[in-house]
Image (spheres, rainbow, N blue to C red):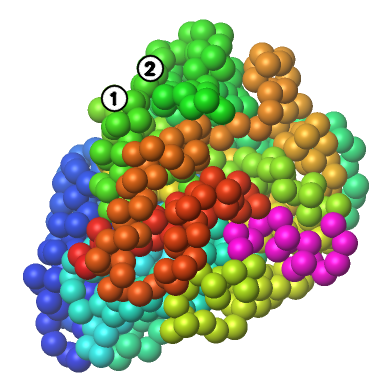
């Protein structure tokens, strides 16, 4: 797990070494263990390393194979690197390191751009092919690892974060009107390749991109999962058994691969608790688990310790729990927002940030339960959508969009008015072939698009801000493929996530399995009042906000007058959405 950056010159000049160093310097927190640079003709790489596999200097990056005329910078983990290494050795390739980075390099030499189809893991990497004078980049199937890029007249640059690209300079930081519509409508999800800034784009999940020294580029999507029933119908017990097998492989065999200890972020919910149970079932001893909680509010408890404590006691884990005062949340909010590659409105971003800070002092790698709700239909809005009539878009939009197009026009200044871009985009995704039913289409869109730029991005950004690698077994691509082929009605049984609950029965206390769906509790940001309301008021009344002119003042004042009255269908604060976006622009644009 690391931070990567690079520049390819398009004008036959040598790369801007200072710009590459600035980008790499902005990635130190993602890779605190080591750093390095490499240049060859028009290409320069920068790298920051978090050493997880092969801790020796043999796996130092950028990694160069002089015999193959290839160089690589890589962020992520390849869980099947050992069998791939054996396959490549059988083809005659020899290795000088013991890690997964070199396996990617040799895989590219052996199979070219199709090497990604062999990789099982989470990854974003760039390979410089000196013979062809091309830069080859790739991102994993579920977009767990990020990859941003920007292109000027004379250069192409890429990095793990937008902040790194901004540090290099010469980026068009104007607001992208289409992305703004997505940001304020689609729960802060801006689908690739757009970002909120016109000058920065991101590589889509399951996609490769090749750029040559003249700036010509080509992209290829290498994984498009189908949500259709298998030729032979399965019984419910067969489905449950198949999911159990895939999940055990994801948790026990793949995401334990490391040369350092692996812990678990134990929220107390079903998903992270089941990860602990499966690891214990596999014989893991002295497992490190971590939970976080916050101050209670009148309407809601601020922690789920009563559940996480049960799991820790049942499986005798080495458990630590951290209780965070509200004052610490507000004090740390600006640096948390500064660590977001894009504006993220989910209240648990701060929770993950503060938890990661503490956990990173204990371990380098953790498993986390993100993705189970999207993969196995655990959210409350799925059955609501299912019960609706109308077009696919109408059924989805009613229960997911944060605001109507008309309200969007009331929210932002006329300069940003345009078509209903979000409805157009979602309608296109839902109309894609290869899904049997409406809910199949929704769940496929969720795991291939929406989850990527909400919980997945959030977990990566918040944990890597402290050099902590988070692995998400519920987003193992083989498990996702299996779940998409399952009848949606089976997932929605038992109030959602029926297969996961069935597997957990007997492994976890019934109180954990049957409890209502929980979220990382953050009452201070959910119930907007007191010092948090004052903070949002200051942001939206600031001179920088007024000068930017992004929002219509009448709408801002309406929300400020009754902040708890205006909530989205997903129960998010519309005031927080505006304040977070403006605050992100202020701390990252320095304006």
Q: How many residues crowd mark 2 within 10 Å: few (<14), some (14–19), many (20+)?
A: some
Coordinates of residue 97 in the picture (x, y in percent): 26, 47
Q: Mark 1 sits on what residue?
A: 362
For the question of whether residue 273 can be seen, the reply is yes
Pointers 1 and 2 in contact (C-beta within 8 Å): yes
Magenta stretch holds residue 392: yes
Q: For the residue labelled by badge 1, is the local secondary structure a helix, a strand or a loop?
A: loop
Q: Which residues are magenta?
A: 388-403
Query: Residue at the front extreme?
Result: 561
Coordinates of residue 410 in the picture (x, y in percent): 54, 72
* Image quadrant in which you'd find residue 479: top right
Q: Mark 2 sits on what residue?
A: 320
Disc 1 from disc 2: Cα separation: 10 Å
Q: For the residue labelled by badge 2, is the local secondary structure a helix, a strand or a loop?
A: strand
Q: Is residue 12 left or right of residue 470?
A: left
Q: Is residue 382 left or right of residue 162?
A: right
């Amino acid at each position: 797990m690391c931070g990567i950056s690079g520049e390819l010159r398009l004008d036959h000049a040598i790369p801007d070494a200072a710009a590459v160093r600035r980008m790499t310097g902005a990635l130190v927190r993602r890779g605190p263990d080591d750093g390095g640079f490499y240049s060859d003709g028009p290409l320069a790489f920068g790298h920051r390393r978090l050493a997880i596999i092969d801790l020796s200097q043999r796996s130092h990056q950028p990694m160069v194979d002089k015999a193959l005329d290839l160089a690589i910078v890589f962020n992520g983990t390849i869980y099947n690197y050992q069998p791939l290494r054996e396959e490549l050795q059988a083809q005659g390739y020899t290795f000088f390191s013991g890690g997964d980075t070199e396996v990617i390099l040799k895989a590219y030499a052996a199979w070219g751009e199709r090497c990604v189809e062999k990789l099982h893991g989470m990854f974003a990497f760039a390979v410089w092919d000196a013979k062809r004078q091309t830069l080859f980049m790739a991102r994993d199937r579920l977009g767990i690892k990020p990859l941003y890029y920007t292109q000027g007249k004379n250069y192409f640059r890429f990095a793990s974060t937008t902040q790194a690209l901004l540090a290099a300079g010469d980026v068009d930081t104007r607001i992208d009107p289409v992305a703004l519509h997505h940001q304020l409508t689609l729960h802060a999800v801006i689908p690739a390749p757009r970002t909120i800034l016109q000058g920065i784009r991101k590589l889509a999940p399951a996609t490769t991109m090749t750029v040559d020294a003249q700036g010509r580029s080509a992209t290829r999507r290498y994984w498009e999962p189908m949500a259709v029933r298998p030729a032979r119908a399965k019984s419910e017990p067969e489905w449950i058994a198949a999911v159990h097998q895939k999940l055990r492989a994801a948790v026990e065999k793949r995401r334990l691969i490391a040369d350092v200890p692996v812990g678990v972020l134990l929220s107390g919910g079903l998903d992270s608790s089941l990860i602990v149970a499966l690891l214990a079932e596999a014989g893991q001893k002295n497992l490190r688990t971590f939970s976080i909680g916050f101050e209670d509010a009148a309407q809601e408890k601020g922690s789920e310790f009563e559940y996480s404590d049960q799991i820790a006691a049942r499986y005798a884990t080495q458990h630590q729990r951290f209780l965070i005062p509200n004052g610490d949340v507000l004090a740390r909010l600006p640096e948390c927002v500064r660590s977001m590659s894009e504006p993220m409105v989910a209240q648990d971003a701060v929770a993950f940030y503060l938890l990661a800070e503490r956990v990173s002092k204990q371990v380098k790698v953790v498993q986390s339960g993100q993705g189970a709700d999207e993969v196995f239909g655990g959210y409350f809005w799925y059955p609501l959508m299912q019960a609706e009539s109308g077009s696919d878009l109408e059924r989805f939009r009613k229960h997911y969009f944060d605001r109507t197009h008309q309200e969007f026009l009331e929210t932002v200044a006329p300069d940003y008015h345009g078509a209903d871009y979000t409805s157009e985009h979602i309608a296109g995704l839902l109309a894609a072939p290869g899904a049997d039913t409406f809910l199949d289409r929704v769940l496929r869109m969720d795991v291939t698009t929406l989850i990527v730029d909400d919980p997945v991005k959030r977990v990566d950004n918040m944990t890597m801000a402290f050099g902590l690698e988070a692995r998400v077994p519920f987003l193992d691509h083989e498990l996702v493929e299996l779940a998409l082929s399952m009848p949606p009605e089976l997932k929605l049984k038992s109030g959602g996530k029926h297969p996961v609950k069935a597997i957990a029965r007997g492994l976890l206390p019934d109180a954990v399995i049957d409890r209502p769906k929980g979220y990382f509790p953050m009452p201070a940001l959910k119930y907007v009042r007191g010092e948090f309301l004052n903070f949002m008021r200051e942001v939206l009344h600031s001179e920088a906000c007024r000068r930017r002119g992004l929002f219509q003042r009448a709408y801002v004042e309406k929300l400020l007058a009754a902040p708890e009255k205006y909530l989205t269908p997903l129960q998010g604060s519309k005031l927080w959405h505006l304040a977070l976006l403006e605050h992100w622009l202020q701390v990252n644009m320095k304006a």
